Image (cartoon, rainbow, N blue to C red):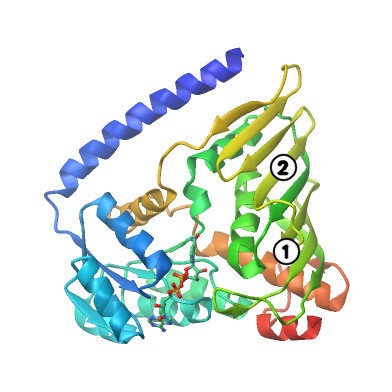
Amino acid sequence: MMELTQDILTWVHGKFLRTQVHALRMARDQWRTPLRVGIIGCGTIAEVHANAYRAVGGLKLTACVDIDAERAEAFRVRHGIDAAYRDYRNLFGSDRPDIVSICTWPSTHAEIATEAAAAGVRGILVEKPLSVDLSEADAMVESAEKFGAVLVVGHHLRFDPLVERARRVIESGQIGPPRLVHVYCQGALLNTGTHAVDAVLLVLGDPAAESIFAQVVVTGECRERGLPAEDACVAQLRLAGGVTALFETGNVAREKFCIHVVGGEGQMTLRLDRLDVLRRGERGWQTEVAPTVSPHERQAEALVRATRDGDRMPQSNARSARRTQEILIGILASAAARRPFALPLEDRSLRYAELLERLR
Ligand SMILES: NC(=O)c1ccc[n+]([C@@H]2O[C@H](COP(=O)([O-])OP(=O)(O)OC[C@H]3O[C@@H](n4cnc5c(N)ncnc54)[C@H](O)[C@@H]3O)[C@@H](O)[C@H]2O)c1
């Protein structure tokens, strides 16, 4: 109980300080030249990005792009943006944005992000999944580093206070060393599965992934977010330190999204709206509900701070997302070959579509 009270006091104090710092920064940003922001792909998630940038402040949405001209124009009008284009190269050429959000379909992420970095865009927020193929993920990491761009990936759970809290529960040893993790996610690997894998890594303190062994069902009938997808998957991920994470994803998963960690001194269950912790010696489960903070706003703010102020690289970056992508591709490769695969994957040419085809 003492520990919990201390935790709450630390959290309240931290929140007070963060609020003050945020207010000071907002006041300072009012006097600066606004950063120019372009949004590429004007669909569902682009709305969330536009609203998040507006909330962060100190920015100007100057252009939007969609291959569907009507969509781009409607988005431009809705958000009071100056220009709308059909080709993102026009945005890089004439608009000179400081920051771009890439909110297009996954198969386009790598091409647009590498061209953005080469065109001198300093801050790039690319939606999840990072890419489709592993070689694309490698190219994205390489180009961001070569051209010095800050590349943030939309694994927004990394900016969710409840997920951060779960990480602190593990880090502070409240449930002892993690031994086994069960993960349930009712979505395809390259859709919500990428959030599940990434959040597990975050919660456990980003340990190195050592090996993957999986079985995957592919009927050919499943598509998610414009990509052909597997129907169901069970996978065993071995992490450094001897922790095993067992994944159930797709239509067999028993919960929408859940990460359950069994530790030596207790247990912890993280869902999207609540965190339950059971510590040895305490009477029962302690529950925390999610605070009403937008992870998308925090994500946009982290990108802006890193791009403009040189703050540290946000924790959802090209390298962290590549590790997640590697596990997703590793799951399909292991299932197709019917054997465990060591991570990082040696064969960088493994292709998502070919692996799915082999699994049908
Ligand atoms: N972080 C999250 O929780 C979250 C939620 C939803 C979607 N997403 C991700 O965001 C991305 C987009 O998903 P969505 O649901 O918004 O899709 P959507 O279909 O609603 O919007 C995508 C838009 O991109 C446009 N587009 C496609 N290729 C383009 C190109 N080359 N140039 C310009 N425009 C192009 C399409 O015309 C469409 O309007 C996906 O990668 C998806 O996984 C993430």
Residue 91 on image: x %, y %: 26, 80
Q: Check disc 2 and report its element: helix, strand or loop.
A: strand
Residue type at numbered disc 2: His
Q: Quadrant of residue 220?
A: bottom right
Residue in view at x 67 percent, y 47 percent: 258
Residue in view at x 60 percent, y 39 percent: 167
Residue in view at x 17 percent, y 59 percent: 34
Residue 88 on image: x %, y %: 33, 83
Q: From what the image shows, is residue 159 above or below residue 250?
A: above
Residue position for label 2: 260
Furthest residue toward left: 31
**In front of the other: label 1 or label 2?**
1
Residue position for label 1: 251
In the foreground, 152 or 187: 187
Q: Quadrant of residue 39?
A: bottom left
How crowded pointer 1 is (Cα within 10 Å; few <14, some 14-19, many 20+) is rated as some
Residue 111 on image: x %, y %: 46, 82
In three-dimensional space, the C-alpha distance between marks 1 and 2, rounded to whole angstroms, equals 19 Å
- Of the four image quadrants, the one with ligand 1 is bottom left
Residue type at numbered disc 1: Asn
Furthest residue toward top: 2
How crowded pointer 2 is (Cα within 10 Å; few <14, some 14-19, many 20+) is rated as many
Q: Check disc 1 and report its element: helix, strand or loop.
A: loop
Circle on res. 317 = none
Residue 346 on image: x %, y %: 73, 74
The disc, 1 or 2, on the residue closer to the chain's N-terminal end is: 1
Q: As drawn, is 129 to the left or to the right of 286?
A: left
Q: Is mark 1 within 8 Å of ligand 1?
A: no
